[in-house]
Image (spheres, grey):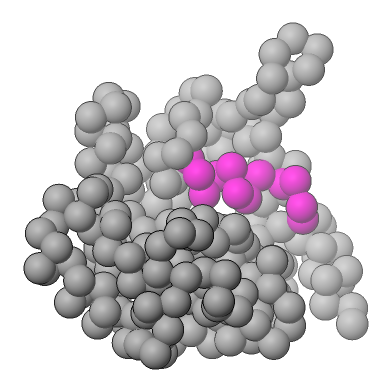
Amino acid sequence: MKLEFQDILKSFGAGTEKRIVLDGITRSVDFPHVLALLGPSGGGKSTLLRLIAGLEHADTGRIVLDGVALPESEEALLRYRRSLGVVFQAFNLFPHMTALQNVVLPLTEVHGMEKREAYPRALEVLTRLGLADHAGKKPALLSGGQRQRVAIARALAAKPRLLLFDEPTSALDPEMTAEVLQLIAELKDSGTPMLLVTHEMGFARKIADQVAFLSEGKLLEVGAASEFFHQPQSLQASRFLEKVLAF
């Protein structure tokens, strides 16, 4: 998969309160399986992911995915969003629905599938992710790791062209974090490209093909993960890695 960023500028607020979050990003990156967006907090990673997902609009510039620019009209943008799977740090599950119903709902309401087709597909994905015995449980009866796996199942069920993860383990304890990271690692072999925002450096080093390093709204480095972790090219990336890998 190829991502191209062409003069991407994104700010929030206005006047004296205006804050530039992404500052004129122009780069391209090819990744066969996993692209990790890394960098210090507040550097613009989640905002860039939301732009790629079509959930935010850039002030200027455009994003091109596999040679096709992200659409601008709301109707076309809605179709584009339907082609992606997005998993956030908050699970965003409906508390009054079972795990199975949470996976079925977007299939029927967003993708227009018939229930007779949606339920078997949802159960198949839940089973694949080790949740078959929990399909009838509501989120309150699931662990944090199980809830995040349901969220991942929901994203996978629609067979997306790209999976996007925005800090999927930040709300989990260490044991549940390991559980979810293991699942994401296993998904690498599924054939669906993934874009991952994470502070788990060891995991990023293990799973990512390519790394994009953002700091203070600028995309300072794009390259192979092995090269980035072994010999970063920018001073900001070197200092970042020294700090996060110190212990």
Name the quadrant of the C terminus.
Answer: bottom right
Q: Is residue 37 visible?
A: no
Looking at the rendered structure, the number of numbered marks drawn on it comes to 0
Residue at figure coordinates x 64%, y 70% from the top left: 169
Which of 215/235 is in front?
215
In reply to whether residue 131 is colored magenta, the answer given is no
The answer to whether 181 appears left or right of 76 in the picture is: right
The answer to whether 182 appears left or right of 135 in the picture is: right
Which segment did they paint magenta? 40-51
In reply to whether residue 48 is colored magenta, the answer given is yes
Q: Is residue 114 above or below residue 8?
A: below
Which of 34/105 is in front?
105
Whole-percent x, y for residue 28 in the image: 45, 50
Residue positioned most to the front? 96
Whole-percent x, y for residue 246 in the image: 89, 78
Whole-percent x, y for residue 100 in the image: 33, 72
Whole-percent x, y for residue 221 in the image: 63, 56
Q: Is residue 242 visible?
A: yes
Q: Quadrant of residue 176?
A: bottom right
Residue at figure coordinates x 71%, y 62% from the top left: 233
Q: Is residue 18 above or below residue 245?
A: above
The answer to whether 124 appears left or right of 134 in the picture is: left
The answer to whether 159 appears left or right of 115 in the picture is: right
